[in-house]
């Protein structure tokens, strides 16, 4: 069953509770270059008590921003006035009861009037001197009427008894959704230069791609639909229109694109983020660029998926550290760029930096990382007094035996990171750790310069060429990961034959 009508049919929402806004929390994003006549928005709500303080807010990505406040007179009239022009966006009038309705503000229409009553019924809205809002409310009235049909279909769908009935209702849902799409299309085509038309166009579905076929009729690319969808995802979004941010549209699109469109693989994320940012930059969407760069960086910095620090590294090195984030605090930029330098040597897919001048628990035998020859190496940094390490290291000892016997050959290069040498030796002896254990007891190794970590245990998996395949995994996941790595290696060997 299609739900796009239910979610997106109308930007109008009636009497929905929203958060209280603090005047201290103003987040204003005015254009510094605009100093014109300012704005004057008059709103009359019949039945509203005098001296009621109402708020003017706007969407900003997936949050709301407070813009202004005004009090009603005895006739329920309030006037919002300011000296700077309000930027394009979907705005909200919020009552003391936390009910609200939406309307449009365009930089070209800064003085207009909206009249309604306390019920906020869509049929009762009157708009004066605003073509944007005339079109906006025309669509909302149409969508509101169709919402009754939608609710009726929902009830029918709940009680459908046969597959035939279900299929029939699904077709009706699709037809209803098509009507909504068509209404948006007609309004945007008739009013191509309006801001609200850009919003309407952003809901347009992508056309079904025509597959390329070989002479025998088979597909040239079995993933053609996926590739087309990814390549054309942003076609209907005006990436030069910063007002997209002042609507629920852009944040939803951005999150859908990065969270649900493709596999969460660092190199794929980097490729698509870089392409999108370049498109926005070329289109001139300064606020969109700022928001997108910040969102991608912050989202993947907090990701628990292995190797995602590659995304943070790329964004830092190619955007923040080369002056493409002029809004960012100097101290923050400096901190990020220092972090980029620290994590670069040990990113996934890089050749692991050599580790030398470490000795085993006899204090006499030096064992360098590159001296190990094994299909895979588990490089682990640990401390015997670390609680998580105390669970992981004995477990790794068990897996070292069982997995090697099962044919998943690997070696462990275990680096002790502290200086309690007596405690370290005791732990190795008591837990009978069979793999390689080394430490920097003479202080001559510089491995800390190449491997950045703030907690232990820290695990890296290297292949036979010392390439970092994965990092930041837990010991318990080792069996599954090694199995996948071996299978992937076999596929590569077969492919290269």
Image: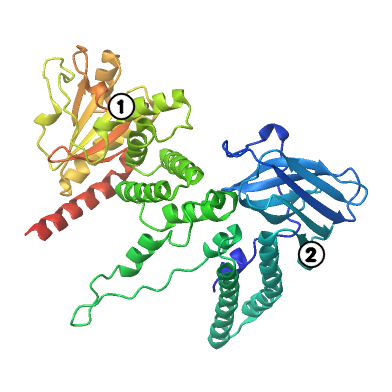
Q: Label 1: state its secondary structure.
A: helix
Position in image of residue 322 (x %, y %): 35, 32
Looking at marks 2 and 1 on the same chain, the residue that comes earlier in the sequence is marked by: 2
Question: Looking at the image, is 27 positioned above or below residue 92?
Answer: above
User: What is the quadrant of residue 24 in the picture?
Assistant: top right
Q: Label 2: state its secondary structure.
A: loop
Q: In the picture, which quadrant includes the N terminus?
A: bottom right
Q: Which mark is residue 342?
A: 1
Q: Which of 33 and 260 is in front in this view?
A: 33
Q: How far apart are marks 2 and 1 (CA)?
A: 58 Å
Q: Name the residue under label 2.
A: 121
Query: At x 60% / y 73%, what residue is drawn?
Result: 183
In this rendering, does residue 489 appear at all? Answer: yes
Question: Looking at the image, is 422 positioned above or below residue 348?
Answer: above
In this rendering, does residue 96 appear at all? Answer: no
Q: Which residue lies furthest to the front in this view?
A: 36
Query: At x 56% / y 60%, what residue is drawn?
Result: 199
Left or right of 288 in this view: 304: left
Q: Nearer the viewer, residue 346 or 285?
A: 285
Position in image of residue 414 (x %, y %): 23, 28
Q: Nearer the viewer, residue 29 or 348?
A: 29
Q: Residue 43 carries which label?
A: none
Q: Which residue lies furthest to the top in this view?
A: 442
Instruction: Say few, some or many: other residues with alpha carbon within 10 Å of mark 2 (under 14 / 14 to 19 / 20 or more).
Output: some
Q: In the picture, which quadrant includes the C terminus?
A: bottom left
Left or right of 399 in this view: 152: right
Position in image of residue 456 (x %, y %): 35, 28
């Amino acid at each position: 069953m299609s739900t796009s009508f239910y979610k997106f049919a109308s930007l109008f929402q009636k009497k929905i509770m929203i958060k209280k806004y603090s005047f201290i929390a103003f987040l204003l994003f005015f254009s510094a270059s605009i100093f014109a006549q300012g704005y004057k928005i008059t709103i009359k709500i019949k039945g509203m008590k005098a001296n009621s303080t109402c708020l003017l807010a706007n969407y900003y990505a997936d949050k709301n921003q407070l813009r202004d406040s005004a009090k009603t007179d005895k006739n329920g009239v309030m006037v919002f006035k300011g000296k700077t022009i309000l930027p394009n966006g979907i705005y909200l009038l919020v009552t003391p009861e936390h009910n609200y309705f939406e309307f449009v503000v365009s930089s070209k229409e800064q003085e207009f009037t909206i009249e309604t009553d306390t019920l906020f019924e869509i049929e009762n809205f009157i708009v004066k001197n605003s073509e944007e809002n005339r079109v906006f409310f025309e669509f909302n009235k149409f969508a509101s009427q169709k919402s009754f049909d939608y609710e009726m279909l929902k009830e029918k769908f709940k009680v459908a008894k046969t597959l035939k009935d279900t299929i029939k209702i699904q077709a009706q849902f699709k037809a209803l959704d098509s009507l909504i799409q068509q209404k948006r299309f007609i309004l945007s085509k008739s009013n191509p230069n309006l801001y609200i038309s850009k919003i309407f166009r952003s809901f347009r579905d992508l056309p079904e791609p025509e597959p390329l076929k070989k002479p025998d009729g088979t597909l040239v690319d079995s993933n053609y639909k996926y590739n087309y969808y990814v390549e054309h995802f942003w076609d209907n979004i005006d990436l030069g229109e910063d007002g997209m941010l002042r609507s629920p549209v852009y944040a939803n699109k951005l999150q859908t694109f990065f969270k649900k469109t493709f596999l969460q693989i660092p190199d794929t994320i980097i490729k698509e983020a870089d392409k999108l940012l370049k498109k926005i930059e070329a289109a001139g969407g300064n606020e969109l660029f700022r928001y997108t760069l910040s969102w991608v960086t912050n989202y993947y910095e907090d990701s628990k998926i292995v190797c995602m620090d590659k995304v943070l590294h790329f964004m830092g090195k190619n955007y923040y550290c080369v002056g493409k984030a002029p809004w960012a605090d100097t101290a923050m930029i400096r901190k990020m760029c220092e972090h980029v330098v620290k994590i670069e040597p040990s990113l996934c897919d890089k050749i692991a930096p050599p580790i030398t001048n470490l000795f085993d628990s006899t204090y006499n035998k030096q064992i360098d990382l590159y001296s190990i020859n094994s299909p895979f190496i588990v490089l682990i940094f640990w401390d015997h007094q670390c609680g998580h390490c105390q669970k992981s290291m004995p477990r790794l000892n068990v897996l070292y035996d069982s997995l090697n016997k099962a044919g998943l050959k690997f070696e462990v290069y275990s680096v002790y990171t502290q200086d309690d040498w007596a405690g370290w030796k005791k732990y190795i002896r008591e837990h009978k750790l069979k793999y390689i254990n080394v430490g920097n007891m003479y202080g001559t190794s510089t491995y800390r310069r190449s491997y950045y970590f703030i907690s232990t245990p820290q695990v890296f998996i290297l292949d036979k060429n010392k390439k970092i395949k994965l990092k930041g995994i837990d010991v318990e996941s080792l069996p599954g990961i090694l199995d996948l790595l071996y299978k992937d290696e076999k596929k590569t060997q077969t492919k290269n034959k």
